[in-house]
Amino acid sequence: MKKLRQVSVVVLLCILFAQAVCFGWWGKKPAKEIPNHWPEKLDKRKLYIYDNAFIYSGSNSQADKIDKFVRKVTKEFSSEESQNIRPGLIIVMDVKEKALFDTEKLLKIVRTAKIADSNDTTQAQLESFNESLSKTKKEIAKLGLSLDNILAMAPMPLETHMLPQLADGFGEGFDKDIGWCMIVPTERHMKAAVNNMIDAVFKAQKVNGLVRVIAAPFLPGAVNKAVNEIKKARKLALFELILMQKNTLTKSQKQEMLNAYEKKIGINKNNGKSKKDDVKSENAKPVNLKTRSDDGGS
């Protein structure tokens, strides 16, 4: 009888495990119905659909982690505002995944879009950008790095209209249901990218074995500190993307909320202010991230 109970318990656990796998209790499954004009996959990344984001990811578990990050940032807004936040599109960068876009091409598309919005001479601006880009590539090459090394670890906000220029499968009108777009590295990808950068710099600078041994105990702490700063930048980038959707807020209100969020997550920007300015700032009334001022909208 005792053995029968044990068998029954094992069978029950197996059934529960099967249900968890089949019904996705541990996260969203790949989207069964792909939205119109959207690719089913980006390279090896499948499309996962969540309440606040469409996520292209190479794995379910990493998609769940990115969704958790999105929900955490979204909670900074009031419940009323959260209901009006349009979902976004996230392309996840994980370890051992090749970059979806050519970095130099991406930078040029972003820069061209910015120039098109300005009143400056387009050709002159493009020539200046190309010259700066060339110089930057040479400088970072001296450190044994490339643009891909630098940007692989960083969150990259994108204008949604740029995607068809960067990846196949996005048709006209694909972005009608989204409000923002962003390339988001996973935490383990950030850590791997920082370690790769350190190795590349050591090799380029011909750092000898003794120095590497001396530096070794300090490297994990340095890597973790760098990753934490990148995670802050990731939060700030997403917060700003969502904030820019708030057409009922004035430009100054958006900037106040952005400054308050920077302070909350620990990003310090002195911007050349004097100590007297800092004292004034500390005495100023803090901005509540979950409220709006009366002239800011409904």
Image (cartoon, rainbow, N blue to C red):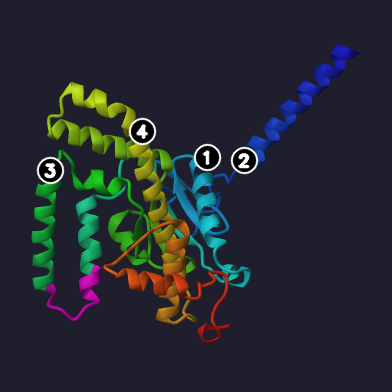
Quadrant including the N terminus? top right
Label located before the other in sequence (4 or 3) = 3
Amino acid on which the number 1 mark rests in the picture = Ser
| Residue at screen point 49% across, 55% down | 54
Residue holding disc 4: 220
Are there few (<14), some (14-19), or many (20+) residues within 10 Å of tag 3? some
Amino acid on which the number 2 mark rests in the picture = Trp
Name above or below for residue 86 compared with residue 228: below
Query: Distance of mark 3 from mark 2, alpha carbons?
Result: 43 Å
Magenta span covers which residues?
A: 113-122
Name above or below for residue 150 compared with residue 218: below
Residue holding disc 3: 141
Query: Distance of mark 4 from mark 3, alpha carbons?
Result: 24 Å
Query: Distance of mark 4 from mark 1, alpha carbons?
Result: 25 Å
Label located before the other in sequence (1 or 3) = 1
Between label 2 and label 4, give the one nearer the viewer: 4
Find out whether the residues at labels 2 and 1 contact each other: C-beta distance under 8 Å. yes
